[in-house]
Amino acid sequence: MRQLTPPIVILALNLDTIEKELKLINDWGFKAKSVKGFYKGRGENSYVLEINDYNHLKIAETLATSNGQECILYSDDFRKTWLIYTNGERKYLGILHSVSEQEALKYDGYTFDHSTSSYWITDNENS
């Protein structure tokens, strides 16, 4: 059995500055870890938010929607991962796991965690 991890959301806001993004995230009641996200091959400043419960997830969805984002990435406590679109659609991606830089660069969506120098992807092969 996989080890339980806290559920998380990874999202981007694409505001003018990182400082504005972090303030907004904080104002919405979240603490954020800054990462570099790649979505559809495009890099953007992204943030990992810990999710405490379903209500917290809905707040993260609203934060993304109110800032013009297409979707958020949600990973549950078993690292099963979905894209949650602002129109309500959900798409299962697979298991979130760490890979080498070389492996991550094969995908058009991945996350780079500066603090651990690790790359993260989701795929069904590890489900």
Image: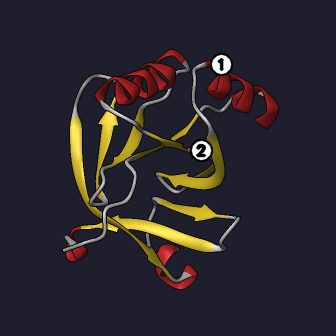
* Nearer-the-camera pick, 125 or 9: 9
**Where, quadrant-wise, is the C terminus in this rendering?**
bottom left
Residue 60 at what x, y percent from top left? 45, 28
Toward which corner of the image does residue 62 lie, by quadrant?
Answer: top left
Of callouts 1 and 2, the N-terminal one: 1
Image vertical order of residue 122 relative to residue 7, above or below: below
Q: For mark 1, what is the residue?
A: 27
Q: What SS does tag 1 mark?
A: helix
Toward which corner of the image does residue 117 lie, by quadrant?
Answer: bottom right
Q: Nearer the viewer, mark 1 or mark 2?
A: 1
The number of numbered badges drawn on the structure is 2
Image vertical order of residue 39 relative to residue 94, above or below: above
Q: For mark 2, what is the residue?
A: 47
Toward which corner of the image does residue 101 lie, by quadrant?
Answer: bottom right
User: In screen coordinates, is 115 left or right of 79?
Assistant: right
Residue 54 at what x, y percent from top left? 29, 29
Q: Amino acid at mark 2?
A: Tyr
Is the residue marked by circle 1 packed among few (<14), some (14-19), or many (20+) residues within 10 Å? Answer: few
User: In screen coordinates, is 28 left or right of 62?
Assistant: right
Residue 33 at what x, y percent from top left? 64, 48
